[in-house]
Image (cartoon, grey):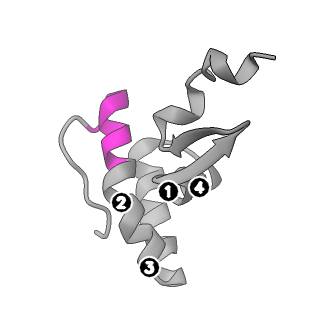
Amino acid sequence: MIASIPKEVYSLEGKRAIIKANASRYKQATKKEKTLLLNELCTILYWTRSYIARLLRGCGKVVYFKGVRFLGEWDSRFSSIPEEAYST
């Protein structure tokens, strides 16, 4: 088994922990290792391969939107944009 799986696997917080724990391993892995890792995470998390790959690639990435800095982790994709970004 390639994936590292912490406790509380089936809760939402547990799924976030699994993605964060495996993100650095995914970025440094070869293509064969990425395939094995994605297959294991698909069976554990019951998500699609493309969605898991997108989460693993985006974990820790810095994104700028209208001059506001966001850290591209799993939960920040769904957070609201600060009101300063909308001021005209």
Q: Which mark is residue 49?
A: 4
Q: CA distance from mark 1 to mark 3?
A: 12 Å
State if disc 1 and disc 2 touch (CB < 8 Å). yes
Residue type at tag 4: Arg
Magenta region: 9-18
Q: Is residue 54 above or below residue 7?
A: below
Write down the residue under mark 1. 56
Q: CA distance from mark 4 to mark 2?
A: 14 Å
Q: Earlier in the sequence, mark 1 or mark 3?
A: 3
Q: Earlier in the sequence, mark 1 or mark 4?
A: 4
Circle nearer the viewer, 4 or 2: 2
Q: Is residue 69 rendered to the left or right of residue 9?
A: right
Residue type at tag 2: Asn
Label 4 crowding class (10 Å Cα cut-off): few <14, some 14-19, many 20+?
some
Q: CA distance from mark 3 to mark 4?
A: 16 Å
Q: Is residue 76 rendered to the left or right of residue 48?
A: left
State if disc 2 and disc 4 touch (CB < 8 Å). no
Q: Position of residue 69 (x, y in %)?
A: 57, 41
Q: Earlier in the sequence, mark 2 or mark 1?
A: 2
Q: CA distance from mark 3 to mark 2?
A: 10 Å
